[in-house]
Image (cartoon, rainbow, N blue to C red):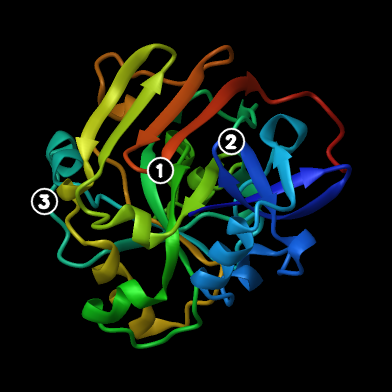
Amino acid sequence: MRLATFTQAGRSRCGAVIGDQIVDLAAAGLPAVMAELFAVDLDRLRDVVDTGLHRIDLGDIALAAPVPRPGKLLAIGLNYADHAAETGRDLPEIPVVFNKQTTCVNRDGGAIEIPRASSRVDYEGELAFVIGRRCRHVRAEDASEVIAGYTILNDISVRDWQKRSPTMTMGKSFDTHGPMGPWIVTPDEIGDPHTLAIRTFVNDGCVQDSNTGQMIFSCFDIVAHLTEAFTLEPGDVISTGTPSGVGSMREPPLWLKAGDTVRVEIEKIGALTNPVVDEPIEPNHR
């Protein structure tokens, strides 16, 4: 099932995408917030969808990020063997974890802004997963039970700002630099998340072409590692790293610029597409 957050007439709620329509789950009495929807049994969701009621054409709504403001937005660095190879760095012995500020979250179709502070803006197509159950000390072999589903995230990175800070947070958290979506696909439709083709396109050119099988630490390993330290909660989003082909490793570097379009495709999920614009000039306080 494809679960989405959408807006219509100024109201935000959750839905299930079926073909070119979305089932308004809130209209059927289910939670309007994605983190709360995860508490609903998947069979119950299917029953609501199967009624054929509460359907809206996708053209009449706007998709938001599936989790518009996650409690945590964490990401894993250097987690693909092919990406580690292109950087010339050794494979990490434990996951490299950093956070992106949740104010960077963006939606499918939302504009990625080239900030006034830098022009060294890079793309990173990634598979992300969303936590569905509050959990701590989860074993890797049990981790699939706490994952509500999978989505696409573009870990937009401002490389010079990233390198200035050992935590990378500043260069990973500029506003609009966390496009996510277009929806969450439940695990029953994904199967093994570590066998998926992943590609990134800048305009019409394919710049990343890999497979999630290149991950050094699996989604399940990541859950086990994180929950050794802290509790994960419904709606937390974890992005699992990017494959080779990032712009900063090209010669010359391929930096994003206004007028570009970036598209990340992941098998069994779909495509996340975002235009690139210059950051607008506006007052400091809004």
Disc 3 residue type (three-letter) = Asp
In the image, taking residue 184 as reference, residue 57 lies left or right, namely right
Q: Is residue 268 or residue 153 the one in the foreground?
A: 268
Marks 2, 3: nearer the viewer: 2
Say which element carries label 1. Answer: loop
Where 193 falls versus 247 (above or below)? below
Q: Quadrant of residue 26?
A: bottom right
Marks 1, 2: nearer the viewer: 1
Q: Quadrant of residue 147?
A: bottom left
User: Residue at the location (38% across, 83% down)?
Assistant: 229
Q: Is residue 224 or residue 14 the one in the foreground?
A: 14
Image coordinates of residue 115 in percent, x first then y, are: 62, 29
Image coordinates of residue 189 in percent, x first then y, are: 36, 54
User: Residue at the location (87% across, 33% down)?
Assistant: 283
Q: Is residue 151 or residue 187 the one in the foreground?
A: 187
Question: Which residue is denoted by mark 2 in the rendering?
Answer: 108
Image coordinates of residue 70 in percent, x first then y, are: 60, 62
Label 1: how many Cα within 10 Å (few below 14, some 14–19, many 20+): many
Report if residue 99 is visible in the image: yes
Question: Which residue is denoted by mark 3 in the rendering?
Answer: 90
Q: CA distance from mark 3 to mark 1?
A: 31 Å
User: Residue at the location (53% across, 75% down)?
Assistant: 41
Say which element carries label 3. Answer: loop
Q: CA distance from mark 1 to mark 2?
A: 13 Å
Mark 1 or mark 2: whose residue is earlier in sequence = 2
Question: Which residue is denoted by mark 1 in the rendering?
Answer: 269
Image coordinates of residue 99 in percent, x first then y, are: 48, 59
